[in-house]
């Protein structure tokens, strides 16, 4: 069931649909901003709430942790109860919990608030993406709209450090959370007029499937994040537990007539290839952004606000990729565009892999190439994933796409961050005569070396910066190798125009629709229509 979406008689989106997209851009950007805003807020927050080291970790991670865990469940819930309804409920909850976070009296309360923000955020991400499918039936317009959606989320992430730094400097740390309040008010006021309601008439949610999805996802996300500090028995146990629960979850979905997640979607090589490319691209992006922001502040010595401004050009590059790719895809196959953009990303990794300690411009330029490639694959890849799903599974496909991207960012920080730290520790020697407490901080990581800079002998900090940069070089080389492989996957499995339209690939033997689906390749008028 779908209400009127504001399309013209030709089936193309009208002014109401574009107004709806502008409205959906607000919570999308807010979600991205909340991912990164706390990076500059934690020092001020710590002065007031005095969290322990473990509590600080949970304050930072609880948000993304619970978003990733609940995305699949919330995407399916939106398909059943209504995507606009879920968006409005989630927006109201996000605004209310943001106030709780802003005025949290203790670290424990803030951790709870961040976890609840993650659950609320999990309702927003698949809802916004599914509603785009309802607003834009024309495949070309939908591809452009998804490009805008992907760009708004990335711009929110890019703006997070700058916004956090400004608000902390002018007000207090809690003001970062209050940004959500006017956004929530605007969405709740305008959604009934601009957004259609759509749902799939399906059976009830299967509670054991929900429990199994959480039992599979949450331990895996925890293991990835925990691995950033080193792989130990806890990380391995969490990963094994998550893998076992995931296996049971998949078996149950294959037996259910109305599964929580239709795992048969993975039988399509196009669908699976698009998800794999998104995963690899986000792993490289997540790890590279984490390392580049550290390079600008710890190696180059920039303030947090100035470093945030230097991240502006890469954000503009991402904007150009996300907006331009759907337009070019009208003339060129999406696989070719995605492969070419990943080739530019590879050039960026080469710049990062050869940068030295005084190469700020090269590092920013390299990250801009990486970010540009992400914009292209996020726009086209997400469109392929969502378009490949049946009408009744739009929310589930959107949630799966977002889950892969959240996991990619978390894995990138964990894997490339851990690799850089390992190289730092193995290549850096301790200068003679350094006092034990300073030596411990110095050998732990570059941030520790900068913290005790006034207690280090001459030249020691420069050695630490060089060791970190060496780790960045190796991490960029590893990420670049994976991106080169992803570019090949694009050429092999996302090569035709049908991939962009989201129709089944007639050349794909795993696709049950086969050649009969070719007639619908250029139009998705049924997409998102329950």
Image: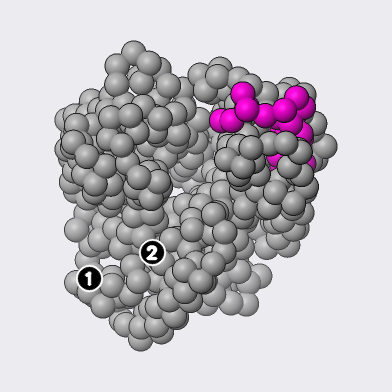
Q: In which quarter of the image is the N terminus?
A: bottom left
Image mark for residue 218: 2
Q: In this view, does 16 lie above or below 69?
A: above
Gap between marks 1 and 2 measured at Cα: 19 Å
Range of residues picked out in magenta:
451-476
Q: Is mark 2 on a helix, strand or loop?
A: helix
State the image quarter where residue 17 is shown.
Answer: top left
Viewer-proximal residue among 279 and 427: 427
Q: In this view, does 475 lie above or below 222?
A: above
Left or right, 245 with respect to 294, comes to left
Q: Is mark 1 on a helix, strand or loop?
A: loop
User: Can you give x and y, in whole percent of width and height, for residue 350 in the image?
Assistant: 80, 40
Pointer 1 residue? 205
The local crowd at label 1, few if under 14, some if 14 to 19, many if 20 or more residues have their Cα within 10 Å, is some
Q: Characterize the magenta stretch by its predominant secondary structure.
A: helix
State the image quarter where residue 40 is shown.
Answer: top left
């Amino acid at each position: 069931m779908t209400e009127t979406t504001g399309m013209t008689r030709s089936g193309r989106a009208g002014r109401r649909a574009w107004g709806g997209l502008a409205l959906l851009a607000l919570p999308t950007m807010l979600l991205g901003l909340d991912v990164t805003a706390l990076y500059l807020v934690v020092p001020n927050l710590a002065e007031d709430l005095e969290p322990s080291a473990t509590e600080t970790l949970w304050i930072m991670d609880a948000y993304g942790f619970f978003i990733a865990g609940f995305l699949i469940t919330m995407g399916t819930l939106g398909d059943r109860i209504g995507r606009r309804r879920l968006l409005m409920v989630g927006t109201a909850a996000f605004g209310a919990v943001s106030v709780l976070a802003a005025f949290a009296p203790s670290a424990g309360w803030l951790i709870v608030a961040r976890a609840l923000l993650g659950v609320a955020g999990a309702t927003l991400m698949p809802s916004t993406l599914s509603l785009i499918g309802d607003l834009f039936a024309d495949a070309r317009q939908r591809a452009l709209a998804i490009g805008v959606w992907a760009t708004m989320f990335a711009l929110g992430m890019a703006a997070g450090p700058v916004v956090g730094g400004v608000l902390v400097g002018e007000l207090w740390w809690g003001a970062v959370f209050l940004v959500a309040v006017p956004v929530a008010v605007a969405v709740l006021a305008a959604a009934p007029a601009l957004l259609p309601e759509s749902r799939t008439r399906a059976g009830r949610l299967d509670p054991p499937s929900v429990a199994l999805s959480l039992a599979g996802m949450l331990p895996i996300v925890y293991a990835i994040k925990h691995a950033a500090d080193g792989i130990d028995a806890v990380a391995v146990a969490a990963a094994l537990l998550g893998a076992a629960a995931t296996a049971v979850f998949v078996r149950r979905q294959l037996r259910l007539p109305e599964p929580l997640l239709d795992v048969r979607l993975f039988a399509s090589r196009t669908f699976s290839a698009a998800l794999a490319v998104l995963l690899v691209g986000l792993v490289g992006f997540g790890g590279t952004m984490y390392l580049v922001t550290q390079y600008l502040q710890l190696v180059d010595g920039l303030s947090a606000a100035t470093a945030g401004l230097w991240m502006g050009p890469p954000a503009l590059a991402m904007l150009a990729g996300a907006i331009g790719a759907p337009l070019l895809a009208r003339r060129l196959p999406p696989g070719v565009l995605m492969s070419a953009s990943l080739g530019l990303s590879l050039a960026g990794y080469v710049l990062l892999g050869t940068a030295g300690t005084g190469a700020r411009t090269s590092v920013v330029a390299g990250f801009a190439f990486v970010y540009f490639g992400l914009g292209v694959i996020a726009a086209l890849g997400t469109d392929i994933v969502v378009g490949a799903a049946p009408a009744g599974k739009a929310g589930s496909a959107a949630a799966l796409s977002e889950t892969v991207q959240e996991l990619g960012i978390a894995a990138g920080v964990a894997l490339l961050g851990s690799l850089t730290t390992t190289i730092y520790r193995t290549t850096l020697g301790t200068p003679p005569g350094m006092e034990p407490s300073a030596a411990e901080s110095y050998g732990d990581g570059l941030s520790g070396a900068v913290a005790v800079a006034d207690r280090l002998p001459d030249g020691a900090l420069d050695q630490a910066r060089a060791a970190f940069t060496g780790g960045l070089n190796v991490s960029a080389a590893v990420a670049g190798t994976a991106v080169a492989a992803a570019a090949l996957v694009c050429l092999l499995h996302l090569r035709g125009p049908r991939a962009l339209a989201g129709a089944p690939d007639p050349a794909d033997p795993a696709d049950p629709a086969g050649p009969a689906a070719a007639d619908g390749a250029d139009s998705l008028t049924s997409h998102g229509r329950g």
